[in-house]
Amino acid sequence: MSDFGNGGKAEDAADSASLASILSRECVVLLDCESKKAALTQLVDLLAETPFVLKRDELLRGVFEREELMSTGIGYGIGVPHVRLDSVKDVVMAVGICKEPIKDYTSLDGKPVQIICMLVARKNQHSQYLRMLSTISSHLKSQEMRECITGANDAEKVFRLLTDSQQD
Amino acid sequence: MHEIELGVLAILGICVAGGVVGAWLFQKLGVPQVVGYIVIGVLIGDTGFGLLHPADVVALRPFNNFALGLIGFLVGGELSGSIFKKYGKQFTAILLGEGLAAFLLVGLSSTLIVYFVCHSWITAMAAGIVFGAIASATDPASTIDVLWEYRSAGVLTTAIIAIVALDDALAMTLYGLGTSVATILTQSGGDSIGTTLLHTGIGLGGSIVLGIAGGFLLNAMMHYMPQTEKRLGISIGILLLCIGLAVALGMDVILATMAVGIVLINRAPKRSKKLFETVRSFSTPIYIIFFVLVGARLSLGHMPVWIWGLVAAYVLMRSIGKWVGAYWGGRISKAEPSVRNYMGMAIFAQGGVAVGLSIVASQNLQHIQVVEGMNLGDMIIFTVTATTLCVQLIGPTFAKLAIKKAGEIGRNVTEEDVMAELKVADVFNTGIVPLQEGTPLGTVIQHFAEQDTFVYPVVSDNGTIIGVLTFDMLKELLIDRDSWHWLVVGDVMQPVCERLLVGMNLGEALLEMQNMQAEVLPVVESTENDKLLGVLDLREARRRVGAELVRRQTAAV
């Protein structure tokens, strides 16, 4: 459990909608994929290693079923794949920064996606889940922040950018 | 083989279980449940299969007194001072009208019939006076039971309750006078009219004094006992004490406990309202046993044929007397048309008081021979028993008809009654077009803005219900307008595992929703067919139940 540095899993911490409470260093990676499918699969595998995801295949299926309803490419080079499942114990997030922007992501603005924030939650964590989605999108609204993240050359820096800036 | 002796508990079990089954069967036929109880009593009693021996019925007499006492108490609880102030004159006129008309018509007709049989004017007149006095009594128990069963309320209902409550006093006065005259006529050396009247007055006055004392005592005790269970306990205790004392002192049980109820409702109307409700719910099995025993007590074997002629004349003349007398009483006192026209037919029932008076009369008049092998006492017992059966069978049905004609059925309903009668199908919302799980949130927020609906069911591509979306669920996202473009309904809906079936009872459905703390649940056809039919919104359902309650309570005003 400590490997993931996720001590902020308590309900009150999650309620404060801070990314630090749901993101661990191990869940931030630099991706070297060319397709949406490969990128999402890699993030699912990352989350499946956390104690919060009990069934990797169910998560993978859930993520792609959600993508079928409507792409989670929200524009500005950001993808926010998300799903709620019974087999997830708590809200948890994985972040992937693509060295090469993914062109087949199908974003709202048609631009390729470079920052992917995957959020998963338990089915009944309605409020926390929505607050986190909103926090992610508002956090990445800043162009300066996006440029810092995409320009970072290691995962540690991305992790700090996402978690430290929010705490400030 | 030894004959099996049923213990008291087994007898009570037969009474309650059999009575409930009988009531259920008769209710299916649209006949008041009290008739079902009595018929079951007749079937298991001496006249029917003989499961209940007359000795068992006699052994359970204290139980009957308990039931009558409870009825008296609950009737008293309906009689607040304001009702008497408003309708006192009217009630007195109707009471005298129906009581005296029944007394006169039954008295005259039975005098003629008995004379035709025994050819003695004195015996015939003695019998006629006693029959007339007994005929003036009305059974409060079965009449009130019909009013409660059909949740009746209104001017006629109030008048019926008051009349059947006061009827006992009139019947006992007429009976006291009647038996004195009968005894004097038959020269048995009995008391003078004055002495009998004095005894009757002491009996009635004593009952009232006893009841008033009990009422004040109960009111004082309730002051120190706020808990419902303790109040129920102390009220039953004081009622039993009153009943026991009334029986021991030869007073009227119903009048005594009615006085307890009247004191309580007038001294502490708010505090006692809940108590009356609790006692009423507690008393149901006791009523059932009481009515089953009434039926079982009716022994109709070995009756000569001519008695049936007397029975027919008694029932017919008593019914006409009650009806015409109540009509004239109502007319003179300028009662409302519904009271004037339908009061008479609501008070046909004859029960415990009549049977009790006939037993007392039979003891006083058993030395007078009517025909070979039958004395006046036996004749009175036979006739009153048979007429009681007849009027107990027709009385509740006519009482139901009266309150139906007056439009007072169902006006005393509670929220629970309405919910128990309604089904989910009656109140669920079918007009809402379900949202597809892939619908963008922006479109949905537009829906909420343009329509009055605050709840939408969410379905998958194949039409299966998967969740519910309420406006409340979107509050996290209201300030984040950007997310409306990239989130879909499936992201923000509340997934649902529970569904309500369309045929489910509304009360059960709302209780289930309350237990699950669910504001909204989808409604489906059946457990096998998960296709969405609509949604049940807890707030909307409660609003509809409230509106239905008001509609029913005011429908016939």
Image (cartoon, coloured by chain):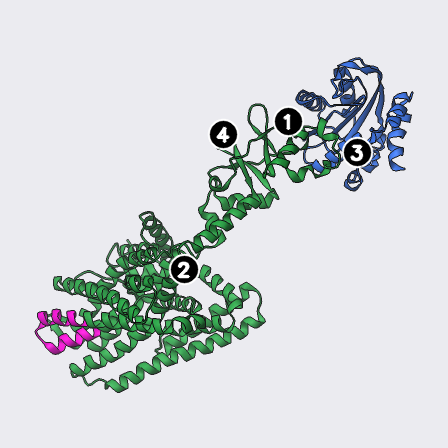
Chain colours: A blue, B green
Q: Is residue B4 visible?
A: no
Of tags 3 and 1, the one toward the viewer is 1
Of tags 4 and 3, the one toward the viewer is 3
Foreground pick, B340 / B401: B340
Q: Chain of mark 2?
A: B
Q: Whole-Å distance between the Cαs marked 4 and 1?
A: 27 Å
Give the vertical position of B293 relative to B450 (above or below): below
Quadrant into which the C terminus of chain A falls: top right
Q: Position of residue B539 (x, y in %)?
A: 57, 45
Instruction: Report the residue marked by disc 4.
Output: B528
For this view, does B404 lie left or right of residue B509?
A: left
Instruction: Report the residue marked by disc 3.
Output: A135
Of tags 4 and 1, the one toward the viewer is 1
Instruction: Report the residue marked by disc 1.
Output: B439
Q: Position of residue B426 (x, y in %)?
A: 47, 41
Please tell me how crowded label 2 is: few (under 14), some (14-19), or many (20+) other residues with Cα within 10 Å. many
Q: Chain of mark 3?
A: A
Q: In the rendered structure, does residue B121 fall within the stretch colored magenta?
A: yes
Q: How many marks?
A: 4
> For the residue labelled by badge 3, is the local secondary structure a helix, a strand or a loop?
helix
Indicate which disc, 4 or 1, sits on the residue closer to the N terminus: 1
Quadrant into which the N terminus of chain A falls: top right
Q: Which residues are magenta?
A: B106-130
Give the vertical position of B176 relative to B311 (above or below): below
Q: Hey, which quadrant is residue B308 in on the image?
A: bottom left
Instruction: Report the residue marked by disc 2.
Output: B153
What's the amino acid at mark 2? Ala
What's the amino acid at mark 1? Thr
What's the amino acid at mark 4? Glu
